[in-house]
C-alpha cells in the first residue's frame, strides 16, 4: 500500500509546498518505481542508498547517513535536483495524480529530495519527502519531523 501526505506552507494553501510518500522500493499499483533510477542493487538498504546517492541530474547534499525510524535502522540522504531528469511526480517513483485540493505537480529543478530507506521485516520501505525550491528550511524540517515520528510495522 502506498500513502501520500501533502504538507502545505502556511502562506500558500492553494498549492502544496512539500509532499511525503512511502511504498516498498519496487512500488505497487498506486505508485510505480522508475526502473532507470534503481537499477538492481542487491543487499542492504545501505547499498540501495549508495545507488540512489549517485543519480545523474542531482547534487548530493547530505548522506547517506545511518538513522533510525521507529526503532528500525534506516539510511537517509538529501539531494538537490539539478536537471529535469525525474520520472514525474516524485523523483524515483511516479503515481496517478489526485484531483481536488492542494496538489503536487512534480519534482522540479532546484527542489530538495529527501529519501529514507528502511528494512522492515522482509520489505525495503522507501520514503520520499520533497520540498520545492522556495519552500524554506522550516518546511523541510517539518517533513523530516513527520518521517521521524512514523510508526512502522514489521
Image (cartoon, rainbow, N blue to C red):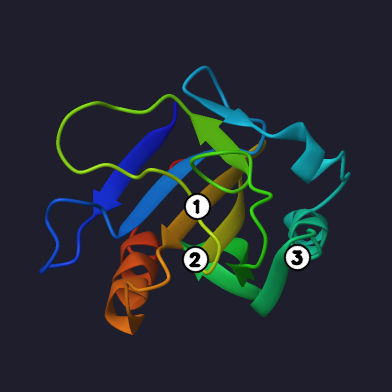
Count residues near mark 2 (Cα–Cα under 10 Å), then give few for <14, some for 14-19, many for 20+.
Answer: many
Q: For residue 52, say whether it is visible.
A: yes
Mark 2 or mark 3: whose residue is earlier in sequence: 3
Q: Is residue 136 left or right of residue 66?
A: left
User: Which quarter of the figure has residue 64?
Assistant: bottom right
Residue most toward the top? 29
The residue at which mark 1 appears reads as 107
- Secondary structure under the numbered disc 2 in the rendered image: loop
Tell me the distance, in whole angstroms, between the alpha carbons under discs 3 and 1: 17 Å
Q: Is residue 62 above or below residue 96?
A: below
Q: For residue 70, say whether it is visible.
A: no
Measured as percent of width and height from the top left, residue 139 is found at 29, 72
Tell me the distance, in whole angstroms, between the alpha carbons under discs 1 and 2: 6 Å
Residue lying at 60% horizontally and 53% vertically, measured from the top left: 118
Nearer to the camera, 151 or 2: 2
Residue lying at 57% horizontally and 46% vertically, measured from the top left: 126
Mark 3 or mark 1: whose residue is earlier in sequence: 3
Mark in front: 3 vs 1:
1
Count residues near mark 1 (Cα–Cα under 10 Å), then give few for <14, some for 14-19, many for 20+.
Answer: many
- Secondary structure under the numbered disc 1 in the rendered image: loop
Residue 111's disc number = 2
Q: Is residue 139 above or below residue 150?
A: below
Tell me whether the residue at label 1 lies in contact with that at label 2, contact meaning CB atoms closer than 8 angstroms: yes
The residue at which mark 3 appears reads as 53
- Secondary structure under the numbered disc 3 in the rendered image: loop
Tell me the distance, in whole angstroms, between the alpha carbons under discs 2 and 3: 15 Å
Q: Is residue 149 left or right of residue 121?
A: left
Q: Is residue 31 left or right of residue 146?
A: right
Residue lying at 80% horizontally and 53% vertically, measured from the top left: 44
Q: Quadrant of the N terminus?
A: top left
Amino acid at each position: 500500500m502506498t500513502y501520500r501526505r501533502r504538507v502545505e506552507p502556511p502562506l500558500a494553501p492553494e498549492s502544496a509546498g512539500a509532499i511525503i510518500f512511502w511504498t516498498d522500493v519496487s512500488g505497487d499499483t498506486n505508485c510505480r518505481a522508475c526502473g532507470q533510477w534503481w537499477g538492481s542493487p542487491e543487499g542492504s538498504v545501505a547499498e540501495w542508498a549508495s545507488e540512489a546517492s549517485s543519480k545523474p541530474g542531482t547534487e548530493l547534499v547530505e548522506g547517506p547517513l545511518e538513522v533510525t525510524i521507529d526503532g528500525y535502522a534506516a539510511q537517509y540522504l538529501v539531494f538537490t535536483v539539478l536537471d529535469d531528469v525525474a520520472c514525474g511526480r516524485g523523483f524515483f517513483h511516479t503515481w496517478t495524480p489526485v484531483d481536488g485540493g492542494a496538489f503536487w505537480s512534480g519534482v522540479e529543478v532546484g527542489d530538495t529530495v529527501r529519501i529514507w530507506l528502511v528494512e522492515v521485516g522482509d520489505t525495503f520501505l522507501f520514503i520520499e519527502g520533497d520540498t520545492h525550491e522556495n519552500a524554506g528550511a522550516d518546511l523541510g524540517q517539518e517533513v523530516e519531523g513527520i518521517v521521524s515520528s512514523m510508526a512502522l510495522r514489521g
